Amino acid sequence: MSLNTFVESATEILGPSGVITAADGKEHYLLDFWRQNRGESPAVLRPANTAEVATIVRLASELGVPLVPQSGNTGLVTGSIPDASGEQIVLSLERMTSIRERDPAGDYLVAEAGCILADIQQAASDMDRLFPLSLGAQGSCRIGGNISTNAGGVNVLRYGMTRQLVMGLEVVLGDG
């Protein structure tokens, strides 16, 4: 199966708003934070929920299509953009921004991977709680990226790395 056929199948799963194929629409997803490195991809997939992520990952696994997960694309090591081959698909989590649950009594909230860090901090504050991860990019970085890189931030000495702030994860494995 060609990458184009995979993208067509992904469009059936995600709908037209969940897939970007136009060159000008993909540009932001193909450049690193410094705008010095550029990758290539025939499409950017933007699932809206975990079920869509699982379906896309399962299809990619079955067909051998490489995916590059992308959260806020604020990392400084070029790890969230595809390579220059044009044979990888970007899987952006930017539409997965819901805070699904807030539990002040249990001192936790449940956020989707694409939730912006500042929004999580505000949700915690609204419950009279503190989510202490604080980064220069907190207005644009997303919690999925923070967790995947185990971000530290300015409060790391007092509260620990991101890993110490996470109670659990809902994950999609490589086979979907």
Image (cartoon, rainbow, N blue to C red):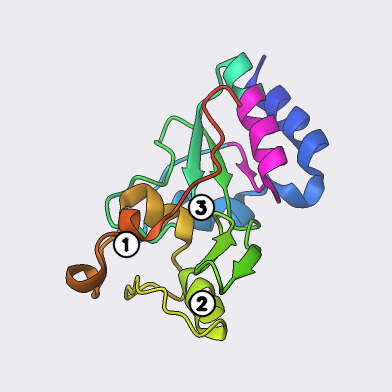
Q: Is residue 7 left or right of residue 34?
A: right
Looking at the image, residue 139 lies above or below residue 1: below
Q: Residues within 10 Å of mark 3 (few under 14, many from 20)?
A: many
Q: Nearer the viewer, residue 143 or 130?
A: 130
**Does the magenta run of residues contain 24?**
no
Q: Earlier in the sequence, mark 3 or mark 1?
A: 3
Cα distance, mark 3 to mark 2?
29 Å
Residue 121, horizontal then vertical, whole percent:
47, 77
Looking at the image, residue 37 lies above or below residue 116: above
Q: Nearer the viewer, residue 152 or 9?
A: 152
Residue 29, label in figure:
3
Residue 34, label in figure:
1
Three-letter amino acid code of the residue under disc 3: Tyr
Report the residue at 39% width, 53% height from top. 147
Three-letter amino acid code of the residue under disc 2: Ala
Looking at the image, residue 34 lies above or below residue 41: below
Cα distance, mark 1 to mark 2?
31 Å
Q: Residues within 10 Å of mark 2 (few under 14, many from 20)?
A: many
Q: Write down the region rendered in magenta.
A: 42-58
**Does the magenta run of residues contain 44?**
yes
Q: Earlier in the sequence, mark 3 or mark 2?
A: 3
Q: Disc 2 designates what residue?
A: 124
